[in-house]
Image (cartoon, coloured by chain):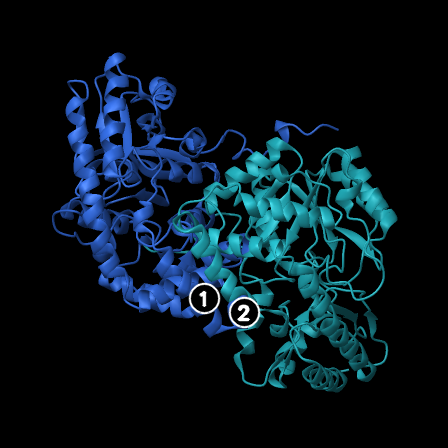
Chain colours: A cyan, B blue
Amino acid sequence: MEFNESYFAKHMAPISGSAIRDIFKLLGKPGMISFAGGNPSNAALEPDVIAPIAQEVISTIGAPILQYGATEGFIPLRESIQRYLLDSGVPCEESQVLPTAGSTQGMDLLLKALIDPGDVVLVEDPTFLGALQTISTYNAKIVAVPSDENGILPDELEKAMKQYKPKLAYIIPTFQNPTGTTLSVERRRRVAELAAKYGVLVAEDDPYHDLRYEGETLPTIKSFDKEGWIVYLASFSKIISPGMRVGAMVVSFPALLRKCVIGKQSSDLHNPLITQAIVDAYLRKGLLKEHVKRILVGYKKQLETMISGFESFPEGTKLTKPQGGLFVWAELPENINTTALLQKAVDNGVAYVPGTHFYPNGGHHNTIRLNFSNSPEDKIVIGMEKLAKVLKENN
Amino acid sequence: MEFNESYFAKHMAPISGSAIRDIFKLLGKPGMISFAGGNPSNAALEPDVIAPIAQEVISTIGAPILQYGATEGFIPLRESIQRYLLDSGVPCEESQVLPTAGSTQGMDLLLKALIDPGDVVLVEDPTFLGALQTISTYNAKIVAVPSDENGILPDELEKAMKQYKPKLAYIIPTFQNPTGTTLSVERRRRVAELAAKYGVLVAEDDPYHDLRYEGETLPTIKSFDKEGWIVYLASFSKIISPGMRVGAMVVSFPALLRKCVIGKQSSDLHNPLITQAIVDAYLRKGLLKEHVKRILVGYKKQLETMISGFESFPEGTKLTKPQGGLFVWAELPENINTTALLQKAVDNGVAYVPGTHFYPNGGHHNTIRLNFSNSPEDKIVIGMEKLAKVLKENN
């Protein structure tokens, strides 16, 4: 017998992997400046702080930290995450907090709990391509809801809820990936109301919540949630460490939380206890606030440097200047195809993600997503010059 | 609107969670002796060894250990796992090794890659209940293939392969969970041949491979695999630490491995780098062999103590004396219902897993699985006395 494509499940057959992660493979070249990916700055990571904490939690907790743990999570961590969430304007009980392997797993567990093949999932247009891939693995029908510079359009969302009667919508309200836009307060309230009115669960994915460089923090969608339709997805990837894979989901409906726990039990049993205990100790020691304050200073400068770099971009470029997060999004003149130009840019030592990958229905080949957090300012200056040159040569 | 059961995906609706993990909740009572679960002994865990290794790898690797990692795994770990596998009689290339969150995730990723709702998955009868649950989350049809004291019956396996034309079978060849039986060499060869003949992928789940207290190590099924139909699932849960959630899958077909990587990318992006680096350093330092040698001494005594405890069990009890692993399995007189007696046993301070949970089609209410690794010898003596008393009173 021969192994071939016919063995693959229907939902997996068409999926060839995240474009971003394939771009990563182009980045090994020495001197490459990468505006692709969504990595925090290496300077924003604290191995010198985390190393002694790791030693401390393992020594203090002893053998139980190496044993099997509960799928529901390391209890002290659930408590410290709850405290962190209450500080972030996310009303929740400790019993509603489920630690996950990043917010990616939170979305995966929701999909596993809810989605049968062919079910509709509503998303913003454009949205995070990793989420699009995760949704695809459940063979869901993805329906893109139009957004503008203030985020998803509530009237369009309502129309889609009426038309498709979906179980689930996925929204990144704050410094959205990829566009950097932030959903206005009024729209947040509307989203929560629509979720309740039409009985649609809304995954509020909020990994950039703390990365605000200007303006006031807005209330979460979850803060307007009276019945429990909003599932809040938190992540420590952008503020402590992505490599530790610690995030959490807040699920208000006990029966839904239970299904998410069962889904996690079936896929990885539980998050490693060591990484859970490290994040718990980090939060308990009160290290997060000062750390975030410090990294915001650097990220703000990097963002401003990148924005300045747009001055030499082709005329007609429209960029979204975000108030926070890790990305700048731009619409280039219509004749520029960022997908086609990627290889040329990489050959010139600079990488990015073509915007088309974030659109469920493709197209929009003149859009581009640039990450500024993972490059120091001097590299941002050089990278933007290189990129401007490639774009202009092909305009 | 009201949230209710109708929201759940068809595959999740009927699943209420692992019986074992629910039994765990009964175990909080002080003084409880638990023969449930499959935890290694606390004495077999080495927080004093792991703590400085954790500190060391984080300090040495620095910021990159806290960054995003590749879904394909931490490269040094893939290399050390390959070396470990070659030592264990698992022929493989480094590029075929995918680190997973325990062997549970290996099975989950295989199912995700292959299984459409209604597809048949073959399993041993009885088999690991955690695997049964994971298979259920893909809405597969589980077909149980009869086994005897030498493991799964190849003729029955062939019959099932012919009849159902499945894509996947799941086999625990060594010190099987729950029965403790080991698949004979001749049958291992047959399983590999049948897999190739009928084009069925076989997941060889081998977490107890190193835990042999007597007899000779047998060649893996994978060692008889000429074409690539055997997917080997390795785990460090029973020999280093379950709480770190580090295992690996060996996938020979590149296209299948790629789908598993995509499945992992969509669910947790990658294993935490810290735990991967700890296991890597542990293996590189050559600590595993001595450690395993040491824990075998203790486990062997615990197993013998438990076997002795059966002397006071009701007449007619048939027990499987395993040559390794973590479990003793017994068939009690037919009138004893271990499911019905569990609460009474727990009230008397001793817990176990009723054997029925391991049978895809239920029944076999007179069977019982007892774990000996997680209780010191004196507790095993007392626990077996308590259990014998409960059983006899209800015989």
- In the displayed structure, A238 sits above or below A25; it is above
Q: Is residue A386 above or below residue A61?
A: below
Q: Is residue A138 visible?
A: no
Q: Quadrant of residue B147?
A: top left
- SS state under label 1: helix
Q: Point out residue B361 in the picture as x, y percentages from the top left corner.
A: 35, 26
Mark 1 and 2 residues: CB-CB less than 8 Å, in contact?
A: no
Q: Residue at x 49, y 55 (%)?
A: B264
In the image, residue B227 lies at what x, y percent? Answer: 28, 58
Q: Chain of mark 1?
A: B
Work out whether residue B230 or residue A196 is closer to the camera in this orientation and state it: A196
Q: Amino acid at mark 1?
A: Gln
Q: Label 2 is found on which chain of the structure?
A: A
Q: For this view, does B154 lie left or right of residue A44?
A: left
Label of residue B55 in the image: 1
Q: Is residue A35 left or right of residue B92?
A: right
Q: What residue is shown with label 2?
A: A47
Secondary structure of the residue carrying numbered label 2: helix
Q: In the rendered image of this protein, does residue A135 appear above or below residue B368? A: below
Residue A370 visible here: yes
Q: Is residue A295 left or right of residue B288?
A: right
Quarter of the picture holding the C terminus of chain A: bottom right
Identify the image quadrant of residue A95: top right
Question: Is B43 rendered above or below residue A334?
Answer: above
C-alpha distance separating marks 1 and 2: 9 Å
Q: Position of residue A143 (x, y in %)?
A: 71, 48
Residue type at numbered disc 2: Pro
Say the numbered circle drawn on residue B328: none
